[in-house]
Each structure stands twice: as C-alpha cells, then as structure tokens.
Amino acid sequence: MRGLEHRGLASADGPIVIARRSETAGYGEIVAVYGGDGRRRVGRVVDSSEDAVAIQLFDSSAGLSVDDSRVEYLGKALELRVGPDILGRVFDGLGRPTDGYPEPISSEMRDVNGMPINPAARVYPRDFIQTGVSAIDGMNTLIRGQKLPIFSGNGLPHNRLAAQIVRQARILPRGQAGEADESFAIVFAGMGIKYDVARFFIDSFERSGVLARVVMFLSLADSPSIERLITPKAALTAAEYLAYERGMHVLVVMTDMTNYCEALREVSAARGEVPSRKGYPGYLYSDLASLYERAGKIEGSPGSITQIPILSMPNDDISHPIPDLTGYITEGQIVLDRELSQKGVYPPVAGLPSLSRLMKDGIGPGMTREDHKDLSSQLFAAYAKVKSVRNLSAIIGEEELSSLDKRYLRFGERFEAEFLTQGEFEDRGIGKTLDLGWRLLGLLPREELLRLPAALIEKYLPKEGG
C-alpha cells in the first residue's frame, strides 16, 4: 500500500535530504524519494522537527531536483526477509540477494533495527568455541555468546584470519574432541570492502564447503557509504532469527567496523552535528553498543549469538576512538601485531595486549582440559619475560645476558615460530595446542614455572627440553 506523499524538498546535501514532515513520520521510517527522472531512491528518517524531516538516502542524491522531487512515507522501518533458506545465500548490505537467486521463500519480515538483549534475560557464556587457531584457543579463548573483536591495521592479514575462523570454527561436545555441532551457523558481514576481498571470502567458503552454513552480507566499497550503516543491523537480524527462532548457535563476523564508523561520521557531519573525538559523533559509543550488545544467550532459548567484530586501527593506534570504545563494550580483544607480521608470523596475534575476559569460565575440566587455565597463565608469564629480556638485550647485547635469559630468548623464538605461527589452512585441535604449549615450556627450567601446580608439571611436561 502506498504511503502519504509530499512534493518538493527543502534541500539536498550529500546523503541527507530535508523534506516536509508528514504527521505520521517516525524515526527510522523508510521513505521513497522520486526525482524528476522518476528514479526511486530509498532512505530512512534520521531526524525530525515540527515541520521538516532529515532523510538519509541509501543512494546518491545526485540528480535530485528540489522542486520536482516527491517524497513517499512508507509507514514502516527497514525490514529483512528471513527464513530457513537464507543459509548459503549472499546478500548486499541492505539484504537484497546478489547471488543470482530469488529472495528467500518466506513471508516473515523482520525490523533490522532490533534491540540489545535485556541483561535480565541473559545467560552467562560458558561454552568453548574451537577456532583451530592456537593463539586464540590456547591463550584468548572464544566463548559461546561472547563479543571478542580483532584489532588489526592496514596491510595486516585480518581478512585471512577471519576466513580461517569461519572455515574452522566449531562447537565441540563438552569435555571431548568431536564433530562440529550441526546447528552451528555463521553470519558474515563485510562493510566497505573491495570487490577482490569480497571475492576472496566467497571463493574461500565455497572451496572449503562451509558456504552452505554461511549467510553473507556484503556492502562493497563502491556502494553508497550509508549502506554500511545498515549492513551490520541486517546481519544481526538474520543471526537473531537463526539463533532464537531456529535454535542455532551463530557466529557473527563483521569486517571492517572502522568503515562503519567512518560512514557514521560522514552522516553526522552532513546533519551538522557537533563532533566529538576526531570528528566522530558523540553517540559513537552508544551506537556501537547497540550492535555489540545484540550478542549473547537468552534464557529459555537453545540458540546463541557470538560476535567477532574486526576493525583496522588507524595508524595502528589502539587508543583511537574506534578500538578504544569497542574495548569498553566487548569482553576482550585479539590484537594483531605489525612487528610479528613482518617476521613472517601468521596469524600475528600479539601475546600481551590480547585478552579474553570470559576465557576463565569456558575452559578447564569438562570443557577443554584440566591444564588449560594454568598452562595459559604460564605461557603469558613466560612470554612477558621474553619481552623484558629482549629489551635488555637491545641495550647490553645478547652476549652479556645470563644463561637463563638466553633460554628465555630461545623460548620466545620457538614460541613465535611454532605456537603462534600456523598455516592458513591448518586446523589445530585444542589438545594439540595445549600439548605444543607444554613442549615449549620444556625449554625453561622447572623452577621458573611458578604458575603451574607440581601435579600438572609431572603429568604433562616433557622430561627434556626441545
């Protein structure tokens, strides 16, 4: 049914047009704007006053005539068509199919805006997700229902790591290595990514056979930047349907959140809002929280949503507003290190800045292995000592170091070359990751392993160093 129409615009400035206000217009309502050429442009209401509304277009405003344009208020929010057959499909940033197949056969439409999960309805996350990546599984474990972002930088292999996690991520039966849970699905959202990057993800998922359980939302770099503001909302709407209606466990990977925030800054500037840090709007924190807090487990529902947002830090600055605010909202972060990447380490996960705040509740007996918690703590402590010894070596020279310090240097080299480094298609089980950690700790004197109980040392530590 057609909505109420008004003729003429007050102004058009980039992606924002100002039109006469309809009495029924509400925030977030979808609007169709027709130019003099008859072309239909879709947008949404982002602000209103007594007699005017600001409309954010999901298209260019080029060619719009202030006098000849028509504005049609559609009386509904932007919606996504969902159904069980969305798995294996590829959509654009607004949820329109781009894989050559028709829309999912379903009459169910969902408002993409959604709502963060009520804290009173949340179930505390406790179940381990195996990514097959030792640096994550062993020391920064991902838990089902967690928000664990990856902080990267320009030129670092975050796309390769994201594809590897999607290919390998699985939920294992408690206390044992087994097959992936059949109800496990993945929602992938790409924002402002280049065509070759989008092709890389699609080809990677097709070759590995996981595309059948992946839903992809791709907003390419040549798409209107405003589309990026809808892409994560559409992806999370699909994830909520799969998790809370179909009872599936869903892993949501979103890249690159920096492009999302840049689009938010562009719209804010076009609306004439007072900027905050580095020109970003003052509501950047609450806007990011409205996305991140849509992850979790809800009481009474068997499904869950786990998020891995990926963002590239401008100039590798972890104090930049985007990673800074993201770190306040999420439960830890995986930080990629440029120095490790230049050494040829893949994935170049920085040992000390990386953190998973929920790790302690998802590992141990009955979940991964009894030694996981203590082993991870000892590896962190030993690697921190390596950093200290390397700084000392840079000052006095390696030949002046004590024999113990030289053993730590050897441990650090082997830790980066064997534990952190693994092939892009190498899927390590948690048992293999933990055994590798023990083998590397065998390079150090037993009296240095202060974080390990004697019983675990006797059970797992090799008798001789590697």
Image (cartoon, rainbow, N blue to C red):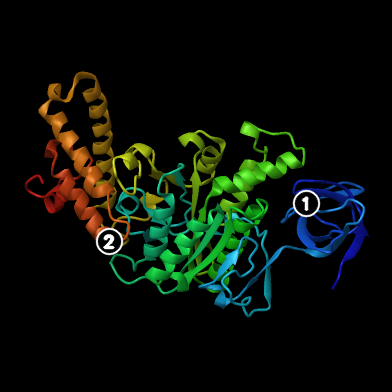
Horizontal relation, residue 89 to residue 459: left or right: right
**Residue 153 on image: x %, y %:** 45, 41
In this view of the protein, which residue sits in the foreground, 159 or 379? 159
Q: Residue furthest bottom?
A: 105
Q: Which residue shows up at 86% across the image and 70% down it? A: 2
Q: Which residue is mark 2?
A: 429
Q: Which residue is painted at 62% across and 62% down in the image?
A: 234
From where the camera sits, is residue 117 visible?
Answer: no
Q: Type of residue at label 2?
A: Gly
Establish if 79 lies above or below 126.
below
Residue 250 is left or right of residue 442, and the answer is right
- Front of the two marks 2 and 1: 1
Which residue is painted at 56% across and 77% down in the image? 84
The kind of residue tagged 1 is: Ala
Residue 299 x, y percent position in the rendering: 54, 64
Q: Is residue 298 above or below residue 65?
A: below
The residue under label 1 is 62
Q: Residues within 10 Å of mark 1 (few under 14, many from 20)?
A: few
Q: Position of residue 443 (x, y in %)?
A: 13, 41
